[in-house]
Amino acid sequence: MDTDRDTYYTALLARDRRFDGWFFVGVSSTGIYCRPVCAVRTPKFANCTFYLSAAAAEKQGFRPCLRCRPELAPGHGILDMSGTLARTAAALIEGGFLSEAGIPDLARRLGITERHLRRIFATEFSVSVIEYAQTQRLLLAKRLLTDTALPVAEVAFAAGFSSLRRFNDVFQTHYRLSPRQLRKTQIFAATSSTMSFELGYRPPFAWTELLEFLACRAIAGVERVAQGVYQRTIVIEAAGRTLSGWISVEHVPARHTVKLTFPASLAPAVAPLLSRVRSIFDLGCRPDLVDAHLGELAAALPGLRVPGAFDGFEMAVRAIVGQQISVAGARTILGRIATRLGPPPSAAGESLPEGLQAIFPSAREIAALPVEALHGLGIIKARAAAIHAVATEISAGRLTLEPLVPLDQTLAALLRIKGVGEWTAQYVAMRALGWPNAFPAGDLILKKQLGLASAKAVEHHAQPWAPWRAYATLHVWRQAAAGGGEPT
């Protein structure tokens, strides 16, 4: 990054939040590396070295700043990674992929050979896949030690280390202090039943409008939006176990973060939980780029995000159920699915927050039922069969509906399922896959609001909005709702 040193130093001087998470600066006079928004006095230009990742800075012997905390930096958006498989691999690693699988599995997920993965990763980040993964584990452990009362042994395993001894050795070697020296034990109550983490974003952030979107579509008993807080029940796989519980997310505008809270029983799933919440609230978005590109369309509401999904199967069910019926009608049916076909609330293992009393069924649970179980909930036969087919494909491992999956292959697999059309596939791509250029051109609200008669005409009209057509869709839907139209 030496050729861009002047540019990065200018961003550092300005503490420009648009660059937060895009690079880190190592300071030779202190041996510390920081985010570009660090509040400490700006180091001299001659003492600065710039890195594209925390792992690259740590490989050169720099330790993370205890004030700006590099582990809190926002991540990258999906489109930022589309041009480089290495960045896609990095995002999967940050979400805990290698805690459950190996490098060969990561290469297969990306559709490349293991040798090619290692080569492109080293070229992009100047570190190996293993070195990058180790840095992510250390930063997560540092975060757990700083922000929670979790015992050190549990911190080690939650961060992805196979043994406490290995964790202590690596931590001491990299950070030159032990985990217990870092921890400020007097801050925490040893019996804390919940854990909280702050996740950064790049402002502006249209939080109120994002919550309005989620509230309008909230499944009764599964989700709740009240007093500026989003809550929902969850089921997640981690450390070879199926964990159930709940999450609560609120905005902390003064710190440009959202605060995630969940039961301490979900500690083994910290890494995937943080990753999924980043997706739900689109925290990797670059609003400066999106809003500038969309121009007048985005001018009235800068910082609008595209809401993601906690679970891809649940989002596919939402999309299929919502075909050609109102949002209110879809919510009623989705509530029945959760209440009658989901696991009992006691599966969450503890008391749930007020208003949460249902868990949405998994693909595996729906696939094990006859199609008639869905049809009996008021879902027409064709849609019930489509939901069952999606559940079967996911539970068999032939279909994955998550951010960072290969887009074209995933859309093709969806469209092969009878009852899943282009609108449904694009809506799933928009929310479950987090694809910023997804565009449901056949949407009735889009056609009506834009005054166009066909999906082809809408597609042509939207060409200038690429590669941010999902954001454009949200803006058009909001305009329609403001004019009294039915939300999609």
Image: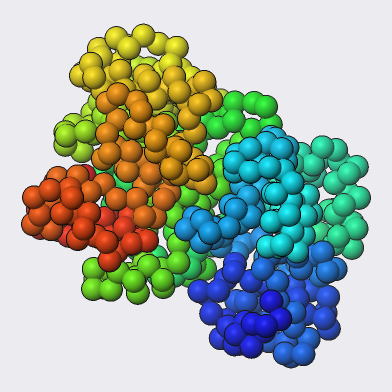
Q: Is residue 281 left or right of residue 378?
A: right
- Whether residue 338 is visible: no
The residue positioned 12% from the left and 48% from the top of the image is 454
Question: Is residue 272 placed above or below 125 in the rendered structure?
Answer: above
* Colour convention: rainbow
Q: Is residue 65 left or right of residue 251?
A: right
- Whether residue 421 is visible: yes
Taking depth in this image into account, of 280 and 449 the one nearest to the observer is 449
- In the rendered image, residue 272, in percent from the top left (x then y), is placed at 59, 42
Question: Is residue 293 placed above or below 477 in the rendered structure?
Answer: below
- In the rendered image, residue 352, in percent from the top left (x then y), is placed at 47, 32
Q: Is residue 254 left or right of residue 186?
A: left
- In the rendered image, residue 337, in percent from the top left (x then y), is placed at 33, 22
- In the rendered image, residue 55, in percent from the top left (x then y), is placed at 74, 61
Give residue 488's quadrant in the image.
Answer: top left
Q: Quadrant of the N terminus?
A: bottom right
The residue positioned 51% from the left and 61% from the top of the image is 80
Give residue 304's quadrant in the image.
Answer: bottom left
The residue positioned 51% from the left and 56% from the top of the image is 82
Report the number of numbered marks. 0
Give residue 37's quadrant in the image.
Answer: bottom right
Question: Is residue 467 placed above or below 241 in the rendered structure?
Answer: below
Question: Is residue 94 placed above or below 272 in the rendered structure?
Answer: below
The residue positioned 37% from the left and 67% from the top of the image is 290
Taking depth in this image into account, of 418 and 330 the one nearest to the observer is 418
Q: Is residue 71 left or right of residue 244?
A: right
